Image (cartoon, rainbow, N blue to C red):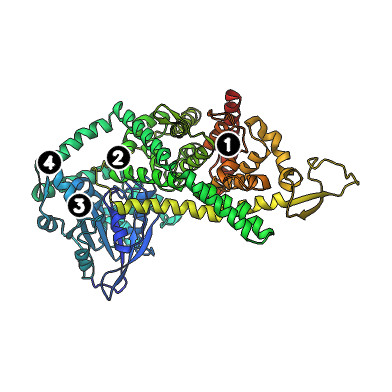
């Protein structure tokens, strides 16, 4: 087919095949590169200059093992590739295959090839295949598959120029099917082809198989397809099994003629032996716990080194601006709200850099995929599977909406498990918040060679995991859902992490926290500052001697430059909520900061920094000293209020915007409200019990 000046080129392949790495290399857009099935659920697009005349739109389709839609990934890929009217329907397909796992990769390749879209095969990870003792004859493979085969290294960027050159030339549309489905249901296929004006047998076959769940097929057409299946006794499961067996038989024949299995090198053999320990039902958990302990210890060992210096520099900057700028509202807002709230987060950037770097190293090496496999064995007993461990282990953004999106393939009973359980699992916005809270409030002592702060972080990590598992188990007893869908994932070989990718992952996560600080923490802190400078003037009945905390009666609000906390509107609000939060060990200030944190967890620290910076005698102290004076000290021991606060945040809903995401993803308008009430009530009860226990 002739090449357009702006062709649409779709990337498709199995998870862990290097598809997202190739997308990054081609477009320069830095999409998340991970080792989990379904990191990319939505379609991603970018532009790639193939030569001086042709600029292609690159479409990154979700990683999937098959076109049969067991969940959202397969459904998204099929909706695009079997719908020529889709705005994302490609002119050319680039199939990315992992050379070390070619047998499984070729199943999806054969399905996509039979849809009749012009295609090129990008053969990735040949170096890994050689280490595993797999020898591939690229030219022979190209001849047998009937498509161009281009060897590449997606992460290193090797072979991309040749791939671009091939894409600038006409790509042949293969007409001979890889596996002919026509003999499976000839009369039914003829009816479907005629009804939908199709010429491709496999497109018609997929409509018969999955037209009932396709968004591109109208309700009338779905009913018509159902009648065709009934009339011709079209048994979907039986025919799908025959198709899969037939495809694999052809794949075995091709690989027997184009590849040889040699002896793996010594390094690969050692890694395979090590793999047996990493995924062992006993040693695997012990090694994972040991790595987490080391990781969390390093976060505070290394992160605490520059903490005192940064605290002094930030406090010096604030004091300098306070004395040099003219006194007034701007001075007060800048030096007692904006700078302290930002400083409360920025002082712990070294801790976050260490955390994200170490987590990215584990993720990029392929180790986290082993943990998902290991967790599947444990979590399946409680009604979850290894996929539910994704937000627990990833440095990606919180995956609760993604988990809910997968629920489109489940019943409402199974979706309820995600609504009530998924938010309890740790994800990346939660762990950095734990680091901030523990760094602020937990004394930097040691227990032998171990940092107390690191041990507390490990305890919170384990506590959240146990809470999610127990909640799932209870829900499993209350809600009888059908068996959880199988968790299918190719275990990738260990790979050397690239520092370019590590720097990118760290940069993306730090940027996300920084942007959240600018978009949410600063406005919330400024609002708290405003409450601290607004005085309520009660005008009812001439009761001038009425105590300022008697209540918020209708009256006037006056803005004052200097105002005692007890006379401010913030003081009134704190007094009102104090009886509610006192059983948790919180006072009015802590309660007000907790309320503000429903916008974003980091807002809690910004609010405390603003509240602690108002008194003139406190402004001479460092920022950390000011914040820490807001709660009762207990020597080197951890204050009960801090434990109660950490437990509260382990259960409370992360952000209000997640409720909006849930509302969009769920067909139930009441789901966000129910989740907010459920999680807030659970957080309050747990914090109350912990405070009573440790007080």
Residue 152 in picture, x, y percent from top left: 20, 57
Residue 152 falls left or right of residue 332: left
The residue pinned by badge 3 equals 179
Percent across and percent down for residue 651 are 53, 36
Marks 4/3: CA distance? Answer: 35 Å
Mark 1–mark 3 Cα distance, whole angstroms, equals: 51 Å
Q: Quadrant of residue 131?
A: top left
Q: Nearer the viewer, mark 4 or mark 3?
A: 4
- Identify the residue at image location x=15%, y=59%: 146
Provide the secondary structure element on which disc 4 rests: loop
Q: Name the residue rendered at 45%, 46% in the picture.
A: 398
Among numbered discs 1 and 3, the one appearing first in the sequence: 3
For label 4, count other residues whose C-alpha is less than 10 Å away and answer few (under 14), some (14-19) or many (20+): few
What residue did someone put label 1 on? 678
Could you classify mark 1 by the number of other residues whose Cα lies within 10 Å: few (under 14), some (14-19), or many (20 or more)? some
Residue 615 horizontal/vertical position (percent): 68, 46
Pick whichever of labels 4 and 1 is earlier in the sequence: 4
Marks 3 and 2, the one that precedes in the sequence:
3
Q: Do the residues labelled 1 and 3 touch (CB within 8 Å)?
A: no
Q: For mark 2, does the 10 Å Cα neighbourhood hold few (<14), some (14 to 19), or many (20 or more) residues? A: many
In the picture of the structure, the residue carrying the numbered disc 2 is: 367
Q: In this view, does 102 lie to the left or right of 514?
A: left
The x, y position of residue 281, in whole percent, is 30, 27
The residue wearing badge 4 is 265
Label 2 residue SS: helix
Q: Indicate which label's residue lies in the foreground, 2 or 1.
A: 2
- The vertical placement of 643 against 565, above or below, is above
State the SS at label 1.
Answer: helix
């Amino acid at each position: 087919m002739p090449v357009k000046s702006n062709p649409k080129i779709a990337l498709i392949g199995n998870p862990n095949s290097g598809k997202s790495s190739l997308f990054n290399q081609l477009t320069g857009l830095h999409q998340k590169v991970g080792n989990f099935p379904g990191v990319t659920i939505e379609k991603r697009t970018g532009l790639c200059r193939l030569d001086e005349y042709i600029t292609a739109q690159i479409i990154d389709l979700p990683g999937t093992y098959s076109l049969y839609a067991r969940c959202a990934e397969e459904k998204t890929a099929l909706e695009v590739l079997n719908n020529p009217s889709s705005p994302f329907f490609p002119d050319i397909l680039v199939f990315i295959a992992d050379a070390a796992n070619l047998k499984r990769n070729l199943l999806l390749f054969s399905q996509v090839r039979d849809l009749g879209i012009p295609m090129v095969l990008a053969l990735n990870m040949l170096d890994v295949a050689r280490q595993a003792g797999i020898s591939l004859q690229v030219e022979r493979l190209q001849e047998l598959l009937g498509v161009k085969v281009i060897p590449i290294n997606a992460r290193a960027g090797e072979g991309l120029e040749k791939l671009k050159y091939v894409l600038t030339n006409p790509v042949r549309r293969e007409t001979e099917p890889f596996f002919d489905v026509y003999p499976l249901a000839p009369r039914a296929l003829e009816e479907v082809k005629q009804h939908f004006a199709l010429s491709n047998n496999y497109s018609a076959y997929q409509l018969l198989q999955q037209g009932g769940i396709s968004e591109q097929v109208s309700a009338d057409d779905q009913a018509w397809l159902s009648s065709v299946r009934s009339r011709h006794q079209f048994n979907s499961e039986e025919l799908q099994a025959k198709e899969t067996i037939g495809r694999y038989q052809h794949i075995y024949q091709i690989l027997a003629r184009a590849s040889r299995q040699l002896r793996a090198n010594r390094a690969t053999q050692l890694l395979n032996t090590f793999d047996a320990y990493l995924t062992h039902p006993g040693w695997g958990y012990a090694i994972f716990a040991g790595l987490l302990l080391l990781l969390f210890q390093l976060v505070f060992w290394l992160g605490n080194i520059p903490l005192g210096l940064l605290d002094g520099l930030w406090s010096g900057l604030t004091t300098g601006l306070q004395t040099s700028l003219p006194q007034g509202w701007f001075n007060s807002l800048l030096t007692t709200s904006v700078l302290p709230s930002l400083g409360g987060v920025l002082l712990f950037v070294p801790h976050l850099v260490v955390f994200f770097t170490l987590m990215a190293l584990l993720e990029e090496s392929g180790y986290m995929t082993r943990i998902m496999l290991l967790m599947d064995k444990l979590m399946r007993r409680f009604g979850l599977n290894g996929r539910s461990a994704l937000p627990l282990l990833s440095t990606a953004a919180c995956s609760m909406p993604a988990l809910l999106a997968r629920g489109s393939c489940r019943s409402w009973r199974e979706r309820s498990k995600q609504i009530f359980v998924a938010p309890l699992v740790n994800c990346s916005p939660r762990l950095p918040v734990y680091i901030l809270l523990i760094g602020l409030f937990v004394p930097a002592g040691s227990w032998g060679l171990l940092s107390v702060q690191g041990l507390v972080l490990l305890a919170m990590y384990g506590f959240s995991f146990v809470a999610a598992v127990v909640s799932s188990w209870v829900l499993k007893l209350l809600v009888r859902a059908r068996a959880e869908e199988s968790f299918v994932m190719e275990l990738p070989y260990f790979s050397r992490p690239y520092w370019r990718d590590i720097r990118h992952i760290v940069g993306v996560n730090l940027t996300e926290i920084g942007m959240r600080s600018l978009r949410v923490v600063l406005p919330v802190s400024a609002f708290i500052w405003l409450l601290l400078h607004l005085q309520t003037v009660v005008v009812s009945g001439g009761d001038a001697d009425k105590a300022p905390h008697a209540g918020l009666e209708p009256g006037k609000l006056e803005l004052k430059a200097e105002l005692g906390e007890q006379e401010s509107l913030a003081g009134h609000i704190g007094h009102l909520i104090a009886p509610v939060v006192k059983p948790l060990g919180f006072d009015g200030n802590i309660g007000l900061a907790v309320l503000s944190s429903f916008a974003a967890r980091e807002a809690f620290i910004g609010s405390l920094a603003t509240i602690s910076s108002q008194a003139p005698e406190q402004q001479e102290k460092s920022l950390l000293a000011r914040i820490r004076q807001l709660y009762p000290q207990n020597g080197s021991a951890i204050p009960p209020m801090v434990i109660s606060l950490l437990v509260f945040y382990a259960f409370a809903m992360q952000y209000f915007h997640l409720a909006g995401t849930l509302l969009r993803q769920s067909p139930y308008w009441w789901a966000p409200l129910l989740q907010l009430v459920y999680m807030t009530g659970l957080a309050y009860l747990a914090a109350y019990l912990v405070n009573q226990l440790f007080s």
